Amino acid sequence: MSIDIETYRLKAQEAIGYVFVKEYHNSLGIPMPIVKMLLPDDANYSTGQYYITIDKTWQIHLNFGKLPISYHEFQNEVKVLTRHEIEHYMCCPFDVITHFRMLKRIRDVYYKHFSHLGINIKYACGAISNQAADIIVDTKNYYRHSKETLKSEIDWIKIGANISACPRHCKLMFLTKEAIWKEDLGINETDPEFLKIVHQLADSFTKNGIEDKSSFLDKVEEYAEIFFKLYVEDQKNPQQSSQQGSQQQSGQQGPQQQSGQQGSQQQSGQQGSQQQSGQQGPQQQSGQQGSQQQSGQQGSQQQSGQQGPQQQSGQQGSQQQSGQQGSQQQSGQWGVGRPKDGDEHGNAFVFADPDKVKEAIEVLAEETSVEEFIDLLAIAGIIGMSDKQKGVLWFNVQSANIIPIVEFSNTGNKSSYTYPSVWRIGDPIEELDLMLTYMTSPRLIPGMTTKKWEYVSNDDNGTESKQMDLLLVVDTSGSMGSAMKESANMHQAVLASYGILSYFESTKSKVAFIGFSDKIDAYVDWSDKYDDVRERLLTNGHGGTKFPISRIKSTLDVRSRDLVTVLITDGDLGNINESVSYFRDYLNDDNKLYIFLLGGSKSLHSYEPLKNIGAKIYNANNANEFCDMVLTDME
């Protein structure tokens, strides 16, 4: 019997229009869902594929696969799916930053208590977060449309594996809904201890109301902890977990299975059409899916006894990219416990462009360490940014306090001259000119006959003052540590550097950068490409410490204007005496020098003579202290 695809498309659009217009009164502020009808050879044909892309707005995608014979039944399911995706936008997670925070809570639970499992948490987080969110949105929809929501849930469970034979962590989401709704979803769970846990979780989800946004993060954290505990127990006692049947024989193993992939389990018990149809998509996810969906892969994948969470993770490479099977099957391992919507890893959201969610990403940067931030963006599926670019973004946000190195020079010509004056006790000994002294008197009497030269430089009248250009010199030796470790001096050096660069960027000044250890590790010549400098700053310290005098000289020689040099170091320069001597000449040429010494540097006294000829020297433990010191000096 042939199916009229266009008629079904129109029926879908009618049902969607009903939900948008009659139920939500055209007040959503998001576009109508994009509808696509999948062909039988599509990997997701047996279950369809449903997800949300987040770009300029939230765009729902409803990709329908195998169609029921009844138009009425089809339209009811379209309404359920449409409400489901709308409530992700309206209720949970509601906004992108809440989604990020939910992922962080799951990640925190894993690394605090379960990191020994070796699961690839980057793939598990999205699936677990989606499960917790679906308990909330499906319950809200059940309260409003109980009959249609209940039927859809039961039908969805039937599409997958024999759920009664699945491990407990794979049944957690469905059993929690069953407990909250007080309805029979046909799971037939009899383990009293497990049911006790489920009912306690259900009570937590309904406390203060299922839609209480202030408790979403606590709910997802509790769900994740129970999920991982069940997974551990299921791994130790596979028979007790009643998962034997198809799941064990199918060779599948880990939470990922549950989560994204019920692969073999579903495959194993479910699959009839789904596997044969070679399709498993994100929605299959629901009953079968995972990464495997994405590819369209099956055969071997199902039989390839998939392996554990890590497999899911690790193997993603080929599995995702191709449609390849083996590993992707593994993705089936997260299947039975997964909701209807999501990508190959169980994420309900696909981010098209990081710039479109920049505000949420910046808030996340404020709330996390740099390592957490980089990891969470990967977990969320933010693509198009390298780890170094993510690091640059994090430091930009964290160093929001500008460190103003306010030093002006005049742009006109200068007149300069010298004249002799008396050298007095307390003046730098290097300023004493013995030849001039003996030319004045054969007797050397300090403060009377001792002489020195005074240097005077005057700007011509009518010239314009302008912020000096910056030479940023940062110690990248081994003692500075890693930029990614908050306890390391290098981390604070980068934060301070970003604050300084922000100021010079605001004045449109040129900057140059030298990173040094016992060699030149990084170099950016004079330019206004501030982000190039920011990116080169993200490094791990190594090697010894030798101040790069010759490179600094060659860098300064190409600039005709007066300059300000900022040196950031922990103070342990191998050639400190030579460096101080160089800086003395540098300052006498009307340049400016700031030295930021990190930590309890023992070399502070070595730089003291430079203070007398205009250098500004600060000793602090972190970038914020440097900022405060500079601002205090400006008052």
Image: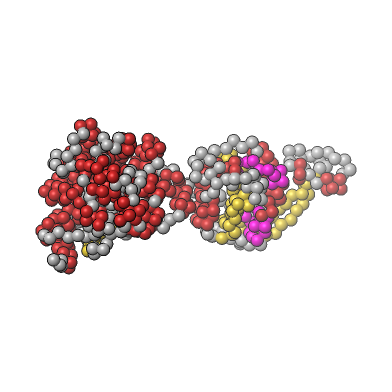
Does residue 477 show up magenta in the picture?
no
* Extreme residue in the right direction: 442
Range of the magenta residues? Answer: 552-580
Does residue 563 show up magenta in the picture?
yes
In this picture, residue 124 sits left or right of residue 270: right
How is the structure coloured here?
A: secondary structure
In the rendered image, residue 117, in percent from the top left (x then y), is placed at 38, 39
Looking at the picture, tell me which residue is in the foreground, 55 or 387: 387
Q: Is residue 158 visible?
A: yes
Q: Is residue 399 above or below residue 415?
A: above
In this picture, residue 88 sits left or right of residue 326: left
Residue drawn at (19%, 60%) of the image: 66
Q: Is residue 83 visible?
A: no
Looking at the picture, tell me which residue is in the foreground, 632 or 48: 48
Looking at the picture, tell me which residue is in the foreground, 582 or 408: 582
Q: How many marks?
A: 0
Q: Quadrant of the N terminus?
A: bottom left
Looking at the picture, tell me which residue is in the foreground, 25 or 140: 140
Residue drawn at (29%, 47%) of the image: 250
In the rendered image, residue 541, in percent from the top left (x then y), is placed at 57, 45
Q: Is residue 336 above or below residue 51?
A: above
Q: Picture quarter containing residue 616? A: top right
In the rendered image, residue 242, in percent from the top left (x then y), is placed at 24, 38
Residue drawn at (52%, 59%) of the image: 529
Q: Picture quarter containing residue 179? A: top left
In this picture, residue 142 sits left or right of residue 309: left
Residue drawn at (59%, 59%) of the image: 526
